[in-house]
Amino acid sequence: MPQPTKKYVFTEIVSDVNNYQQLLAYAIYKADKHLVATSLVDDFVSPALIEERLQQLHDAVADTPGIQAGLFLRAKQICTQLFEDVEDEIKSEARTDFIERTLQLAKAERSHWTKACTFVGEGLRGILATIITIILASGIYSLTLNKEKRGVLIDATIKTLFNTVNGDIPVLDVYRTELLRQSKNPSDVVLSP
């Protein structure tokens, strides 16, 4: 009587070595076979009986299209889950990347406003510093003047403060001009304190 030809599980499951689902189905078969073997070893089954049971599993998978279809179904479910997980991970990374880029863009746009505001603020601070310096310098200088000249200096200081926008800042020049304007006899005006 002729002996039946031996079937190999790999050739029964994998018809195309480039088909990842078929390769995964074979890997699932090998994992199941390993679980059966370790379970039998854990139950202290003799090596001969382990070999016999593994051969029975092999023959059942090789000869039964329903078992093979179950392996294909499990492989398809794993692939579907894998693709969903990868898709979710890609979406999450894309979302995170989008948020980071949006924040960087907002920061870059904000920095232009910040630069503009800083520029204006520095200008205002410079003008304020000039005004404070004029007031302090005039106050200190007024301590060296008599009461009449002090009034003239105060007028000159006020005009200077108003002229800071025009660029006429020198208090002393305005002070001398005011002294000359208010004096009836310009030769009497002493231009030093």
Image: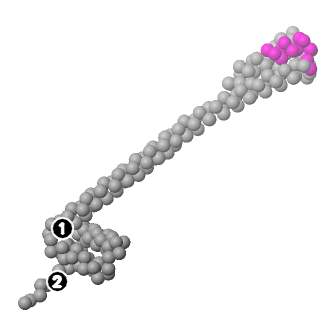
Quadrant for the N terminus in the image: bottom left
The answer, for residue 163, to whether it is visible in the render is yes
Count residues near mark 1 (Cα–Cα under 10 Å), then give few for <14, some for 14-19, many for 20+: some
Q: Residues within 10 Å of mark 2 (few under 14, many from 20)?
A: few
Q: Tell me, for residue 67, which label it has, or none.
A: 1
Q: Which mark is residue 43?
A: none
Query: On the picture, is 189 further left or further right than 9?
Result: right
Mark 2 residue type = Lys
Q: Tell me the element at label 2.
A: loop
Q: Which segment did they paint magenta?
A: 144-155
Task: From this view, report whether residue 99 is shown above or below residue 173.
Answer: below
* Mark 1 residue element: helix
Does the magenta run of residues contain 83? no
Q: Is residue 38 visible?
A: no
Q: Nearer the viewer, residue 21 or 65?
A: 65
65 horizontally vs 99: left or right: left
Residue 76's place in the image compared with 114, above or below, is below
Q: Amino acid at mark 1?
A: Ile
Q: Quadrant of residue 19?
A: bottom left
